[in-house]
Image (cartoon, grey):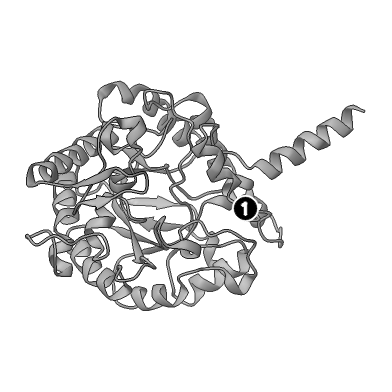
């Protein structure tokens, strides 16, 4: 099967086409450092057969944090634990890329103590005001991304993914729904992509050409007046010129209702791959690998997407929370789809500060252990 064949992401070769998409783990320390639990999870994913791991979104600055116990990277104090993580992943035979991000509109202001920032001023649901970024703010964030990239290289990661998806800061600049600026950072698709391109240029300036640089972005925002595949294609063409080695496509924002990134409800095989047609069109127009997430639960569906040329890699998140060894089970002959029922309990647990785990599977295990002890 093509899904189990090796492939390249820039200068990095991975053993198969399965990618663990960035998943907020909520397992870092209070200071944003990696922990033994987080490292254990990453090694578990390698041993479970995942070809390429992408960490949960890692905050590049204090005011850019999305939640408690989020991984952070803006100080050398963050390096020792990350070096331990990457070392153990590599010892297990794995490859790991760090996703760096600024939450923007969706920053946790009760945690950061700062007002959220965005392309243009927006009222928030809690009555606060998300302030518009100045040019000084933009340059400050560009510098923060570059600093995090330099630290990521020192921490032993195999590459960097810049998050420009799901309405977070860089995503909000790309989207006409969020970005109503009237300067060189707003208006046309080219202007809305300017901030992201300047971030990438700064990141590339702190790393070498053989250090893979990836971007995650929405193929569609699924909000009125939001980003669509045609805008995404214009941006992708610029990203390719800028030296991006792969693009991960996702979709939706927290304001997209039932079309948000983590859609709830158990999926039928014909419903897997939420962004199929947009991704097919997108893939036909660009020349760098496409990583596609969005509701994959079945091996035969993932293989079909690769065979049809819709994408080059399959990204999964919640199924690997439910079953970290799912890929290895499929490789060994299992035919059944993931046991994940997409109830999003794992997401709620992270937001509550309890860390990432599959609640139904955990309860099932506890019940089995209790019965065994009777």
Q: In this view, does 91 lie to the left or right of 186?
A: right
Q: In this view, does 11 lie to the left or right of 46?
A: left
Q: Is residue 45 left or right of residue 6?
A: right
Q: Looking at the image, can residue 161 be seen?
A: no
Relative to 291, does residue 84 appear above or below in the rendering? above
Q: Which quadrant would the C terminus be assigned to in this image? A: top right
- Which of the two residues, 293 or 103, is positioned nearer the viewer here? 103
Q: Which quadrant would the N terminus be assigned to in this image? A: bottom right
Q: Mark 1 points at which residue?
A: 343
Q: Indicate the position of residue 345 as horizontal and vertical percent values.
A: 60, 46
Relative to 279, does residue 71 appear above or below in the rendering? above
Q: In percent of the image, x 58 and y 71: which residue is there?
A: 271
Q: Is residue 248 left or right of residue 186?
A: right
Q: In percent of the image, x 25 and y 32: which residue is there?
A: 151
Relative to 80, does residue 26 appear above or below in the rendering? below
Q: Indicate the position of residue 248 as horizontal and vertical percent values.
A: 37, 59
Q: Looking at the image, can residue 197 be seen?
A: yes
């Amino acid at each position: 099967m093509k899904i189990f064949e090796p492939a390249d992401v820039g200068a990095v070769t991975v053993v198969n086409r399965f990618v663990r998409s960035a998943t907020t783990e909520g397992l870092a320390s209070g200071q944003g450092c990696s922990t033994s639990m987080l490292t254990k999870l990453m090694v578990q994913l390698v041993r479970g057969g995942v070809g390429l791991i992408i960490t949960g979104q890692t905050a590049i600055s204090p005011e850019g944090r999305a939640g408690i116990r989020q991984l952070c990277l803006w100080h050398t104090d963050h390096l020792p634990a990350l070096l331990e993580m990457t070392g153990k992943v590599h010892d297990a035979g794995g490859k790991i890329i760090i996703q760096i991000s600024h939450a923007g509109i969706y920053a946790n202001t009760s945690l950061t103590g700062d007002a959220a920032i965005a392309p243009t001023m927006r009222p928030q649901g809690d009555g606060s005001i998300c302030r518009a970024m100045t040019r000084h703010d933009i340059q400050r964030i560009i510098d923060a991304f570059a600093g995090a990239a330099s630290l990521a290289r020192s921490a032993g990661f195999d590459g960097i993914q810049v998050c420009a998806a799901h309405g977070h800061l860089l995503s909000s600049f790309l989207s006409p729904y969020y970005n109503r600026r009237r300067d060189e950072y707003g208006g046309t698709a080219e202007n809305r992509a300017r901030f992201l391109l300047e971030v990438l240029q700064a990141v590339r300036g702190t790393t070498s050409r053989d250090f893979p640089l990836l971007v995650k972005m929405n193929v569609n925002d699924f909000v009125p007046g939001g980003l669509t595949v045609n805008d995404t294609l214009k941006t992708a063409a610029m990203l390719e010129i800028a030296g991006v080695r792969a693009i991960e496509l996702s979709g939706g924002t927290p304001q997209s209702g039932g079309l948000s990134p983590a859609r709830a409800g158990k999926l039928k095989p014909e419903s897997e791959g939420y962004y199929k047609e947009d991704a097919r069109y997108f893939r036909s127009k660009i020349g760098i690998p496409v990583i596609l997430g969005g509701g994959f639960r079945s091996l035969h569906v993932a293989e079909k997407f690769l065979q049809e040329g819709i994408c080059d890699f399959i990204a999964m998140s919640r199924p690997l929370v439910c079953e970290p060894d799912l890929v290895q089970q499929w490789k060994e002959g299992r035919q059944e789809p993931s046991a994940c029922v997409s109830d999003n309990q794992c997401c709620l647990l992270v937001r509550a500060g309890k860390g990432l785990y599959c609640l139904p599977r955990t309860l099932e295990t506890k019940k089995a252990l209790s019965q065994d002890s009777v």
